[in-house]
Image (tube, rainbow, N blue to C red):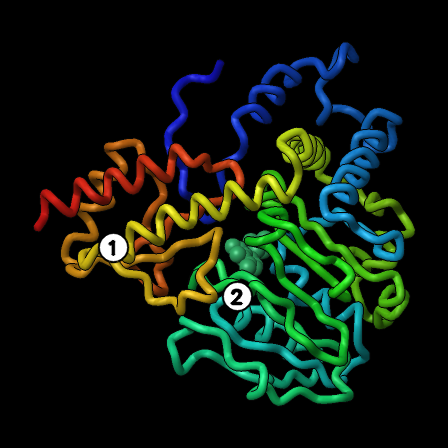
Amino acid sequence: GLMARLHNFCAGPAALPAAVLEQARDDMLEWHGRGLSFMEMSHRSPEVVGVVEGAESCLRRLLDIPDDYAVLFLQGGASTQFAAVPLNLVPPHAPVDYLDTGHWSLKAIAEAQRFADVQVVASSAASRYTDIPARSTWRCRDNAGYLHYCPNETIGGVEFFAEPEVDVPLVADMSSTLLSRSLDVSRFGVIYAGAQKNIGPAGLTLVIAHRELLGRARHTCPSMLDWTIASDNGSMYNTPPTFALYLAALVFDWLEAGGGLAAMETVNRRKAGTLYTAIDNSAFYSNPVAPECRSLMNVPFVLADAGLDGRFLEEASAAGLLNLKGHRSVGGMRASLYNAVPQASVDALVAFMHDFEQRCS
Ligand code: PLP
């Protein structure tokens, strides 16, 4: 087995399942008796193509992705897709609508403004991004090419539990929620996600796009950002990140063997419930997010006395509870509870928090 692995609450890159890492270690020098490692093989070889096709099939089963959606494995992270979305979907200066629910919404908006006529339909800035603007207040345009939103704001810890009802294609940055629970893919025009939360290591980006929306990229769209070119080339227009693809394939197998996304959702709801209950039952810790949109994956919390933040983080770290520092833009703490974080890690965190509170009160 592996040496002792600590409790890792990192927001990204996230923890990976220990079983996946053990498999990768066993395959490292020599993959399936081929005399070389997977990452040393040609991406045109039947072995690599087979693993990538297998990964796509497994992902299609996990998310029940309809056949009229393309699955693309790309590079550049979700941040590259902030530009690729308008470049693939609308002509220059065309109207596109964006919902603003926090840090990652704003990043997507700022990038899209370079390529299209962006309107922010609503924003929760006034509540300091602790809730979701009521649908009745959104100023949507009938002629918008799409509506973009971020179903889980990784920094604010705000998650949507229902898809917005709109009359234009929905485009969603699912970087920190995809594969954490069941999802109705058919509600979306485009879903994209950086891999380094619930998919695999950093370096891989997933795009799931309705085929009706392909073939629209502008002439100036760089080839590497063009979803149609990626689709026509089986996600191998250039050399793909083969090691990241191989690890993602192992993660998908691990999810399927564990009972798929319904089973994962049950585990994730219990993990998040454990932590939110501990926070709510204490006057020492608090979470500012409206209860109906609290994220299952990213739980920000603050101490009543921010002067204790440094000590909290130091002692947590010494107790084997890693990466609990909140994002620099909001301060405080954040525990990310991605798929590879077991209930036992959350239990250890809650026990530590209780103990810390006793000692400091
Ligand atoms: N969108 C969301 C919701 C994220 O959480 C992140 C990273 O944490 C990003 C986008 C940026 O992703 P990447 O680092 O893959 O560009």
- SS of the residue under disc 1: loop
In the image, is 252 to the left or to the right of 54?
left
Name the quadrant containing residue 242: top right
Q: CA distance from mark 1 to mark 2?
A: 30 Å
**Above-or-below relation of 141 to 358:** below
Q: Which residue is mark 1?
A: 281
Q: In front: 306, or 353?
A: 353
Q: Is mark 2 within 8 Å of ligand 1?
A: yes
Give the percent coordinates (x, y) of residue 120.
59, 83
Residue drawn at x 40%, y 42% as measured from the top left: 9
Residue drawn at x 59%, y 54% as measured from the top left: 175
Mark closest to the chain's N terminus, 1 or 2? 2
Q: In front: 117, or 317?
A: 317
Name the quadrant containing residue 279: bottom left
Three-letter amino acid code at disc 2?
Trp
Residue drawn at x 75%, y 14% as measured from the top left: 32
Three-letter amino acid code at disc 1?
Asn
Callout 2 crowding tier (Cα within 10 Å): few <14, some 14–19, many ≥20: many
Q: Which mark is residue 104?
A: 2
